[in-house]
Amino acid sequence: MSVYDQDGFDVRFDWGRGGAERAVTRGDALVVVDTLRFGTAVVAALAKGGVVIPCRDVEEQSRAIQLSGATEVTKGGPGYSLCPNSFDDLKRGTLLAIASPNGATCCHIGARGNTVIVASIVNAKAAGDHIASLLTKSAVTVLACGAHWDIPNPDGLLRFATEDYLGAGAIMSHLKSSLSPEAEICRAAYLGTRENLATIFSESASGRKLAMRGQAEDVLYAAQENIHMVVPVLRNGYLVEVNS
């Protein structure tokens, strides 16, 4: 047992692909939090009845589309995109392929182990309720996926993402089980900032980056608490609503 395993607690917090690997090694259920924008887009799509194939990159997305006939979800523009509002007219049962080097990749890592769900601030309470049921069988790792630097630096490619940290804290705020110190601090950060999430998200590095691309509305959408009650769960390579 490693000192980094947060042993002895029901709910653990970790981040990035390494955190996903550690959760699999421990046998934890994994909660993937990629707030801007994979996780929020997945929740929005499933709320309209969609089914999502999480793809680690655009090449995997292209193969999934060819093999399954799924509809492509782009980063932006016309049609279905990572913009949550783009799914407003989605027909129930539509199969969507979404590429994400962070959230989708962590889903694939988690698929080698226990249950994997996708959650964010927009479905935090619903996710918390479902996590409570998972805790009867195993510990749970709530994972902030993090984001990528445009140019890798001496610390590597992955950077801290405020929105993922607060999203993880929002989910854990609905849990009554024992939290590791790392999880406790994350939850406290959310509780101390929840009244100002829209501003924090907008002024964060990720929020500013999306605003420069004309996607500021997506940032504000992702800061809305509990507007959806669906919980995406990974089953046989597909993200589906947990009650389906």
Image: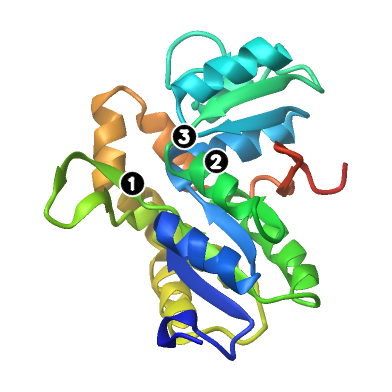
Residue displayed at 45% across by 68% down: 14
**Looking at the image, residue 43 lies above or below residue 11:** above
- Residue 148 location, x and y as percent? 29, 43
Return the disc, 2 or 1, that comes first in the chain's sequence.
Answer: 2
Residue identified by numbered label 2 = 40
Look at the numbered disc 1 and give the secondary structure of its residue. strand
**Numbered label attached to residue 147:** 1
Nearer to me, 161 or 111? 111
What amino acid is at disc 1?
Ala
What residue would you read off at disc 3?
100
Residue lying furthest left in this view? 154
Q: Quadrant of residue 32?
A: bottom right
- Badge 3 vs badge 1, beta-carbon distance below 8 Å: no
Mark 2: few, some, or many residues within 10 Å (few <14, many ≥20)?
A: many
Mark 2 lies on a secondary structure that is: helix
State the CA–CA distance, disc 2 to disc 1.
14 Å
Residue 48 is situated, as x and y percent measured from the top left of the image, at: 74, 29
Q: Residue furthest bottom?
A: 8
- x 88%, y 41%: residue: 244
